[in-house]
Image (cartoon, rainbow, N blue to C red):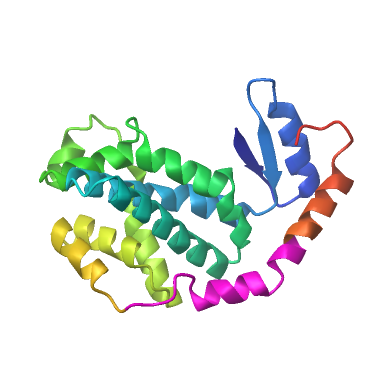
């Protein structure tokens, strides 16, 4: 299953119909920004989960990282104009869980090796030309968060480990000792209260009008 994203609802519906098959199901959305950011930022969080696993912090820590990571992705995505509910779909939590837990994930593998004490330069050199996208994305995400005034502790922590040589375990302790706060950021609460349900209903109505009866949904 995948999500097809296009700004034009009709285009999204056409691509959805072209690609869908009994063994390959497509959903559609017009939230291109949300799908793009979900697909990019999940790689940064997969490195974080790999580091956690490499440090033997356990399954609870990994689950917490995925959950809090999703909150950070949603915070950044909505700040950039995405719909918060997009992060609850395949392009958000679906892609995030797979990349953060899969043994074939390059990004999680890089994090795993860092957590076990290897240096990023040595890991990169051993990958035979393959790349873990989250390494470069962590820098862009951190810089974007700084420019936008967003508090994204996990993304910032991964940036510091990868690009400033911060110690992974020290970074974990610093993250855990931050000021206590509400689970859902105020900005995200406001975004959800400001018509999230209405926007989702409107999007559904628009989709029903734009796509012929019998289309795969």
- The spot of residue 32 in percent (x, y) is 62, 52
- Residue appearing at x 27%, y 58% in the figure: 158
Going 30% across and 33% down the picture, which residue do you hit?
A: 130
Q: Is residue 44 left or right of residue 162?
A: right
Q: Furthest residue to the top?
A: 22
Residue 78 rendering spot, x and y as whole percentages: 56, 66
Q: Is residue 204 left or right of residue 130?
A: right
- Residue 199, position as x, y percentages in the image: 74, 63
Image quarter of residue 128: top left
Residue 63, magenta (yes or no):
no
Residue 11: x and y, percent? 76, 42
| Residue farthest to the front, as pictured | 60
Q: Is residue 187 magenta?
A: yes
Viewer-closest of 141 and 68: 68
Quarter holding the N terminus is: top right
From the viewer's perspective, is residue 55 above or below residue 74? above
Residues shaded magenta: 180-199
Give the quarter of the image for residue 177: bottom left
């Amino acid at each position: 299953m995948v999500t097809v994203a296009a700004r034009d609802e009709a285009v999204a519906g056409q691509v959805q119909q072209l690609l869908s098959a009994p063994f390959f199901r497509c959903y559609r959305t017009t939230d291109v920004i949300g799908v793009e950011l979900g697909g990019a930022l999940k790689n940064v969080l997969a490195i974080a989960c790999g580091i956690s696993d490499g440090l033997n912090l356990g399954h609870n820590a990994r689950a917490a990282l995925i959950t809090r990571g999703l909150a950070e992705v949603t915070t950044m995505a909505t700040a950039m104009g995405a719909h918060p509910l997009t992060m609850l779909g395949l392009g958000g939590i679906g892609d995030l869980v797979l990349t953060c837990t899969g043994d074939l994930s390059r990004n999680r593998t890089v994090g795993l090796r860092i957590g076990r004490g290897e240096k990023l330069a040595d890991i990169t050199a051993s990958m035979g030309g393959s790349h873990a996208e989250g390494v470069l994305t962590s820098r862009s995400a951190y810089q974007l968060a700084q420019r936008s005034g967003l508090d994204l502790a996990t993304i910032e922590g991964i940036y510091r480990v990868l690009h400033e040589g911060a110690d992974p375990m020290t970074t974990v302790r610093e993250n855990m000792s931050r000021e206590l706060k509400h689970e859902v950021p105020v900005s995200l609460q406001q975004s959800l209260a400001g018509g999230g349900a209405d926007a989702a209903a409107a999007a559904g109505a628009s989709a029903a009008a734009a796509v012929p009866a019998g289309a795969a949904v």
